[in-house]
Image (cartoon, helix red, strand yellow):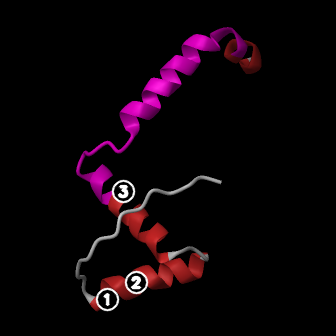
């Protein structure tokens, strides 16, 4: 299981937004902070911010280079 590194912060939002996020979390059986984190990531992505994208693509490229022959065989 992945260990999350979370930071606490304080902010304000309209009751409608908070209630909507809580309803989504309840309906999907998720924790509120997970839904809030997803909303933040979606917003940042929409604004053009890449979160961990460079690191992920670097690992992907390294994997392709290291296991190129294996991937070709698996694709057959």
Q: Position of residue 58 (x, y in %)?
A: 44, 25
Q: Nearer the viewer, mark 2 or mark 3?
A: 3
Q: Start and end of the magenta stretch?
A: 42-70
> Quarter-wise, where is residue 33 in the image?
bottom left
Q: Is residue 40 above or below residue 68?
A: below
Report the disc number at residue 1: none
Q: CA distance from mark 2 to mark 1?
A: 6 Å
What residue sits right under mark 2 in the picture? 20
| Kind of element beneath mark 2 | helix
Disc 2 crowd rating (10 Å Cα; few below 14, some 14-19, many 20+) is few
Circle 3 residues within 10 Å: few <14, some 14–19, many ≥20: some
Picture residue at 40% right of the left edge, 70% below the top: 36
Left or right position of 37 against 62: left
Q: CA distance from mark 3 to mark 1?
A: 20 Å
**33 or 20: nearer the eye?**
33
Q: Where's residue 46, x and y in %? A: 28, 53
Q: Quadrant of the C terminus?
A: top right
Q: Measured along the vertical axis of the image, is residue 47 above or below residue 62?
A: below
* x and y percentages locating residue 22 in the rendered image: 45, 83
**Which residue shows up at 26% across the image and 76% down it?**
10
Q: Which mark is residue 41?
A: 3
3D distance between C-alphas at marks 2 and 3: 17 Å
User: Toward the viewer: 63 or 76?
Assistant: 63
Residue found at x 31% / y 42%? 50
- Of the image marks 2 and 3, the number of the one nearer the N terminus: 2
Question: Which of disc 1 and disc 3 is earlier in sequence?
Answer: 1
User: Quadrant of the rendered structure where residue 54 is?
Assistant: top left
Q: Is residue 61 magenta?
A: yes
Q: Is residue 9 above or below residue 51?
A: below
Q: Which residue is mark 1?
A: 16
- Whether residue 8 is situated above or below residue 24 in the rendered picture: above
């Amino acid at each position: 299981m992945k260990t999350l590194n979370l930071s606490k912060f304080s902010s304000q939002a309209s009751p409608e937004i908070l209630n909507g996020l809580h309803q989504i979390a309840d309906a999907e059986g998720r924790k509120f902070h997970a839904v809030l984190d997803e909303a933040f990531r979606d917003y940042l992505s929409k604004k053009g911010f890449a979160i961990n994208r460079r690191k992920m693509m670097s690992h992907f490229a390294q994997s392709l280079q290291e296991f190129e022959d294996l991937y070709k065989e698996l694709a057959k």
